[in-house]
Image (cartoon, grey):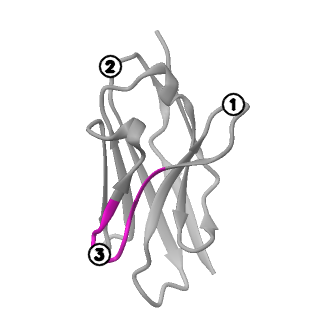
Amino acid sequence: QVHVMESGGGVVQPGGSLRLSCVYSGDIFSINAMGWYRQAPGKGRELVADITSFNNIRYAESVKGRFTISRNDVENTLYLEMNSLKPEDTAVYYCLYYPSSWGQGTQVTVSS
């Protein structure tokens, strides 16, 4: 079983930045793909960005050019650098250690 825990959420003004972190631990026998997902109020969970063990990356169109995903497999940590934040980025952000180990989520609120 793999345990996943996110941190770094908060309240930020439009145009601001935040950095999310996700630490994973437990029965890690190989380097799996990992991803960030988000769920806004009244909406379904959607992919924000993910990264494979070979550092192949994909982003949602809505965050391209603003968000950057990265991983440090020595420290077992996944990151999401979020810049130029918009009110529509407000959501609970979840970390996923593929295929199915989810964190509890961290709230990001973008508001003036």
Q: Which residue is mark 1?
A: 41
Foreground: disc 1 or disc 3: 1
Disc with the residue nearer the chain's start (1 vs 2) = 2
Q: Nearer the viewer, residue 71 or 52?
A: 52
Disc with the residue nearer the chain's start (3 vs 2) = 2
Residue 47 appears left or right of 65? right
Horizontal and vertical percent position of residue 27: 55, 85
- Write the residue at 32% across / 74% down: 73
Asked whether the residues under the numbered discs 1 and 2 touch, taking CB atoms below 8 Å apart as contact, a structural biologist would say no
- Write the residue at 44% across / 42% down: 8
Q: Which residue is mark 2?
A: 15
Outermost residue toward the front in this view: 61
Q: Which residue is mark 3?
A: 74
- Secondary structure at numbered mark 3: loop
Report how far apart the C-alphas of labels 1 and 2 lie in the structure.
21 Å
Q: Quadrant of residue 3?
A: bottom right
Foreground: disc 3 or disc 2: 2
Horizontal and vertical percent position of residue 18: 36, 34
